[in-house]
Image (cartoon, rainbow, N blue to C red):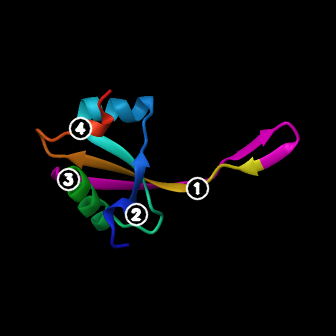
Amino acid sequence: MTKAFDIIQGPIITEKSMSLKENFNKYTFKVAKSANKIEIKNAVEEIFKVKVLSVATINVLPKHKRVGQHEGFTPAYKKAIVKLADGNKIDAFEI
């Protein structure tokens, strides 16, 4: 993985992630499954021009879903929670 935009696939905007953003200055992203914490940190710093203090990653497993007679699984993905230094913020999350 060499490109920052290949690593960071998009933001995750939920009630819990907005609460983390407001209270602890932590932002949540969907990232490439093969990315490690160092690559994620460098990608966020490069794209958003902020200082990253820490990165926590979670592998989200697929869930079994059923709609009528059709069954399947939701896709699995990797989630990263990034803590920024005080005074830094990402404007893409502002509503």
Along the viewing direction, whichever of 91 and 38 lies nearer the viewer = 91
Mark number displayed over residue 6 = 2
Please report whichever mark, 4 or 1, sits nearer to the chain's N-terminal start: 4
Please report whichever mark, 1 or 2, sits nearer to the chain's N-terminal start: 2
CB-based contact (under 8 Å), mark 1 and mark 3: no
At 12% from the left and 40% from the top, the residue drawn is 86
Q: Nearer the viewer, mark 2 or mark 3?
A: 2
Mark number displayed over residue 25 = 4
Q: Which amino acid does label 1 sit on?
A: Ala
Q: Is residue 30 above or below residue 91?
A: below
At 45% from the left and 69% from the top, the residue drawn is 34
Q: In this picture, which residue range is highlighted in magenta?
A: 49-71
Quadrant in which residue 44 is drawn: bottom left
Residue 46 x/y as whole percent: 22, 59
The residue at which mark 1 appears reads as: 76
**Few, some or many residues within 10 Å of mark 2 (<14, 14–19, 20+):** few
Quadrant in which residue 7 is drawn: bottom left
The residue at which mark 3 appears reads as: 52
**Which SS type dominates the magenta stretch?**
strand
Residue 37 x/y as whole percent: 32, 63
- Assign a secondary structure to mark 1: loop
For the C terminus, give its image quadrant. Answer: top left
At 26% from the left and 59% from the top, the residue drawn is 41
**Few, some or many residues within 10 Å of mark 4 (<14, 14–19, 20+):** some
Separation of disc 1 and disc 3 at Cα?
A: 26 Å
Separation of disc 3 and disc 4 at Cα?
A: 10 Å
Residue 72 x/y as whole percent: 76, 50
Q: In this view, does 22 lie above or below 77?
A: above
